[in-house]
Amino acid sequence: MVEKGIGQPVPRKEDRRFVTGRGRYTDDINLPGQLHAVFVRSPHAHARIRRIDKDSVLGMPGVVAVLTGADAEADGIGPLICGWMIHSRDGSPMKMGTHRVLATDKVRYVGDRVACIVAETPHQARDAAEALVVEYEELEPVVDLATAHDAPARVHDDIPHNLCYDWELGDRAAVDEAFARAAKVVSLDLTNNRLVPNAMEPRAALAAYDPGKDEITLYLTSQNPHVHRLVMSAFNNIAPEHKLRVVAPDVGGGFGSKIFIYGEECVVAWAARRLGRPVKWREERSEAFLADAHGRDHLTHAEMAVDEDGRILALRVDTKANLGAYMSTFSSAIPTYLYAPLLSGQYRIPAIYARVRTYYTNTTPVDAYRGAGRPEACYVVETLVDAAARELGLDRAEIRRRNFIPKDAFPYETPVIMTYDSGDYATCLERALELADYAGFEQRRREAAARGKLRGIGIACYIEACGIAPSQAAISLGAGVGLWESAEVRFTHTGKVQVFTGTHTHGQGHETTFSQLVAEALGVPFEDVEVIHGDTAATPVGMGTYGSRSQAVGGEAILRACNKIIEKGKKIAAHLLEASDADIEFEAGTFRVKGTDRQKTIQEVAFAAYVPSSYPPDLEPGLEASAFFDPPNFTFPSGTYVCEVEVDPETGQVSVEKWVAVDDFGRVINPLIVEGQVHGGVVQGLGQALLEHAIYDRESGQLLTGSFMDYAMPRADHVPDFVVEFAPGSPSPSNSLGAKGAGEAGAIGAPPAIMNAIWDAIGVRVEMPATPERVWRALQSVRMPQAAE
Amino acid sequence: MYAFDYHRPQSLDEAARLLRERPEAKLLAGGHTLLPTLKQRLAQPSDLVDLGAIAELRGIREEGNGLTIGAATPHGEVETSELVRRLIPALAELAGEIGDPQVRNRGTLGGSIANNDPAADWPAGVVGCGAVVRTTRREIAADDFFTGMCETALEPDEIITAVHFPRPKRAGYAKFPNPASRYAVVGVFVAETDDGVRVAVTGAGPCVFRLTALEQALTADFTPNAVDGIEVDAAELNADIHASADYRAHLVKVMAKRAIQKALG
């Protein structure tokens, strides 16, 4: 076993700098002569811009420029794009409302960018931003998703009914037929609440233009610097791709919100060139609430048909998803291809049909947020399964057992275009029930009742799909980019290893796990590996980090590069050891002539590669290799969460008392980091289930939960101790590591586990977030009849 | 934040003089309401007069049959004070439920009651105990001090120096916190004092108020059962995204029961 190799709970390398305050974030970087940008944002949800009076601020102290959408257009700055084309059921392409880097005709949500003030200091820029005279003609906003279709107003004047697309997946006729012969049908109306991502670090950008090289360097809070460079070059005309360097240094969390290409970074980069001085922008927290893409926000009518034994016959789902005012970068894919294909859950469901309509509203754009489509799907499936169990009087674990895809059925093709790679759902469920003492629950319920509390238990069996793949299939479904990942592994003269990855770490601990991977593959000390990421000038072209893809896709690319190094190393070692290539074996950092004690370490081989005093004549010097990996399929992590809650019937307050997670992530590289990912994901899921809700005023379209005073985030005392166990595991066959991805599982599985537990506790289903008042009202509704007796 | 002049007077007289001379000045105590307001540019005082260097504003002492707490004493000191825990433990508990440790280490009693946020905890404790607010000019009875939403009886150049809390025979505070802000959605302070039973409710209405019907009921029967016969009129209560008026009315009764239970020990 390699010390600090695969499977070891190695503490994170990154923590040395993070916990000692030595991280280097975008806002920590300052350049000589830099200017400061502040965005003037719309105070209205929907208004026509009548006039922007630049003269109202141009003489103010320190003001260097006032930039508007008209200036951007005049300079050829292109609008923002959505990178995934969706076609409606009738074959027509999605209707994309123009999304400019700065608004020109109308503002479409509170926080929409109207102008950018650039000044010598941040305070001067802010003074001018407050003073800028903008005349608006207020329009009626479209706020409510449920009524957006028939709203009198249009968010985009050229898009009727505010409807972006009307998409479907699955066999509608087969589903109708199954429903017609079903013993029971359960149906539910479900709300998946809108969330604000709230990464710890708000967004920031710092751009500098070098006229000598005619090149822009952009420091940015990005999860995918190469994708930023690509889109900003190809669509926004910020600079040719080879003349734009994007650097994403330490980034304090993203959860999806830093994937997207926003107007702010385009304006900052454009302004730096236009003004010939570096320009910096740092978002304020209250700005982040308005300006960072939100998550979720679905209304779903879902029906499940079951036979008399509780076997699922079919699923029919009709979802309205809120796009917000504009299409954000990947917004079209989230409620379609990252949602409906997951509706089979862990179950053998013969027929599934999903229809999804997405609507524009005068609210902040909505896009991927931790889980992105998969939490919404899991919530639908796991709530319906509980509903069916109740309808049939079946135990909620038993109905799941009866419907699981058996472990010998993989690869398993669902009716909604997915081929699950591997899994052992029943083992996860049984182990979770055992750890949770499911059998002993009724005793705990009685004990709680004696204390005046209502205790409930909930189960959720989730499926996730990580690492969107393969590229060709995704592109055929509308993806605008490939979905491979890249790596370059380089030995130095002295035997140290540099790993260049196209992924980006912003909390995931890649510097540690990738070092473990390389230590294991090359047999070098963990401490001798340095992972370099986040700089388009240093790393190979890569797609970045989102969708729990980095280990399964990026890790595999690193492994393949390591394998190329070993192959080359064998040739060098054979020469040094005067043996034939075929007789050299490699193990734990040593090349050895098979069956002998003649050997060279990989460090000796690396030195020989750079100082080739004795070297194979036909071989290039140097020891480095690059690899691109395009996986043949998604990976499909799965697991079971069991949660117990107690409800205070007098106040409706819910507390989560017990949590068991049994996850199958395939092969786990670092169990310490992965357990941390489960904790974080579960807490975010708990936030969605109990606390978090972005609420807009229905009349004005103002965000009412615009700060932490009103938007409730989970805190340590909301959270119980977690029991986290990794299932023996079904390694993914889609990569040689067998890794599946773990970043989003918690956020996917937790909400239905909690909501099902509350349902069990109080006997009525409530919507998320299960606020005390909602739970109390639900209890009133079931108790009133009793009280009247 | 807009520009302002900052002063750190060493005495109350100097602080009062600054307030008189600069009508747009604001007092700075713990800053937990004022600083976020300034950062959001929602206030533009000409001057900030920091009370942090005035030693006589700080501290907790026994006085007569009760406690006197200096206006600039942070909540955390009240929370952990042995004296408070011995004489009026309900106040230590109230202070310990304010915000989080960072807030409690900076935020002060005087700052809280001068701001009179409708959902702050201290107004319930001050009114519930029938405390007396001492200022640079006079003494103000708790019932006269809180006059409306974020309004008090303080004159523009008047500074709170301390609050004197008569020791109740027994008292309890129960709070239902807002999960985001941790202010009170509803907080109820119940005390049996030498002058009778007092019940003060914060969070529920535009300003802390006394629940006289419950005071009367508790005078007859100081048990949680006294709450059962009480009607709380939702019409006068706050309604917002966190809680409807009906729900607040219900919570007033639940929290009152719990406060009584705590008072009974």
Image: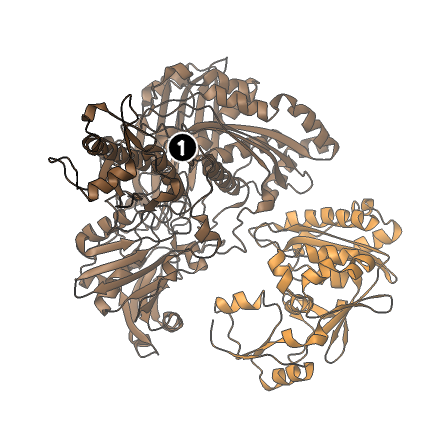
Q: Is residue B256 above or below residue B130?
A: above
Mark 1: which amino acid? Val
Seen from the viewer's position, the closer of residues A641 and A394 is A641
Residue A740, percent from left and from top: 38, 30
Q: Color used for chain A?
A: brown
Category of crowding for the residue at label 1, using alpha-carbon neighbours closer than 10 angstroms: few (below 14), some (14–19), many (at least 20): some
The residue sitting at 50% across, 13% down in the picture is A308
Q: How is the image coloured?
A: by chain
Q: Is residue B255 left or right of residue A587?
A: right
- Residue A560: image location, x then y, percent: 26, 33
Q: Is residue B200 visible?
A: no
Which residue shows up at 34% across the image and 71% down it?
Answer: A133
The x, y position of residue A307, in whole percent, is 47, 14
Work out whether residue B250 or residue A229 is closer to the camera in this orientation and state it.
A229
| Location of mark 1 (residue) | A2
In the picture as drawn, the residue positioned furthest to the left comes out as A618
| Chain drawn orange in the picture | B
Question: In this rendering, would B5 be left or right of A42?
Answer: right
Q: Where does residue B57 sit, x and y in percent of width and height? A: 71, 74
In this picture, residue A274 sits left or right of residue A48: left
Tell me the quadrant of the picture where the N terminus of chain A can be found: top left
